Amino acid sequence: MIAIHQPNYLPWLGFFDKARLVDNLVLLDNVPYSRNSVCNRNKIKTSRGWEWLTVPVHHRFGEEILEIETDDSGWEGKHWKTILFNYSRAPHFDEFSPGLEDIYAKRWTKLAELNEALIRLLLDYFNILTRIYKASDLGVGGKGTALLVNICKAVADGEYLSGAGADGYLEPSVFEKEGISVRFQQFVCPEYPQRFGEFIRNLSAIDYLFNCGAKAWF
């Protein structure tokens, strides 16, 4: 089974739930970058409620995700200080913070490379052993559903796991013509212990990791 997903910044639990269900995960880095998306930002919880952690980027219309460059403004240190300030007293922070601290200690010029590093680290922390590919390395073309089908064929998988939100535009018949069946992920973020009062859903997976550790949410 295969899943295909853009390489988001500090993804939510649903991303990693999809990854654990498949054998192969393809990071869709060769499609146009969308401004104000979770490709360069995600939510964490603070004493004031949820807040965005946003990576500042330089963006020209039509650029693919793999081309997007980050701003040289010292945001890496600022993001780490924000994470440290809000999660240092969480039960599992000391266990899982060193790897993240190492990533934020580096200067990242390419957004896709940063996101891939974070995704691989969190997959390791969650003990998810799914094989990772980058779409840009597969040498396939197409747009929309055709691109997804071509990626599936390149990785030689017979079943595609799609996010539930894609059922409005995905064309399963195009997959089926190529002998690829389609399943839709069914995921609802579980309620778990958090700091700072009332529970907030759909934050970056680091919120779950620091509060609950690497135990399974399923």
Image (cartoon, grey):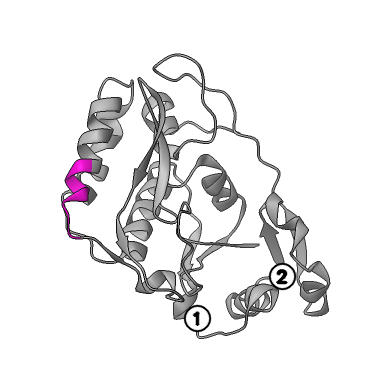
Query: Residue 131, how many percent across, how many down?
Result: 49, 62
Indicate the amino acid at tag 2.
Gly
- Residue 183 or 155: which is nearer the viewer? 183
Cα gap from disc 1 to disc 2, whole angstroms: 17 Å
Q: Residue at x 37, y 22 (%)?
A: 48
Nearest to N terminus: mark 1 or mark 2: 1
Q: Are marks 1 and 2 in contact (CB under 8 Å)?
A: no
Residue holding disc 1: 138
Q: Secondary structure at mark 1?
A: loop
Q: Is residue 58 above or below residue 74?
A: below
**Res 114 quadrant in image:** bottom left
- In the picture as drawn, the residue positioned furthest to the front comes out as 61
Q: Which range of residues does the magenta coloring cover?
A: 72-78
Indicate the amino acid at tag 1.
Leu
Q: Secondary structure at mark 2?
A: loop
- Residue 123 or 8: which is nearer the viewer? 8
Q: Is residue 79 above or below residue 147?
A: above
Query: Residue 105, how many percent across, how many down?
Result: 16, 49
- Asked whether, in this view, residue 93 is left or right of residue 201, the answer is left
Q: Residue at x 66, y 71 (%)?
A: 157
Which quarter of the image is occupied by the C terminus? top right
Queried whether the magenta region covers residue 20, the answer comes back as: no
Crowdedness of circle 2 by 10 Å Cα count: few (<14), some, many (20+)?
Answer: some
Residue holding disc 2: 158
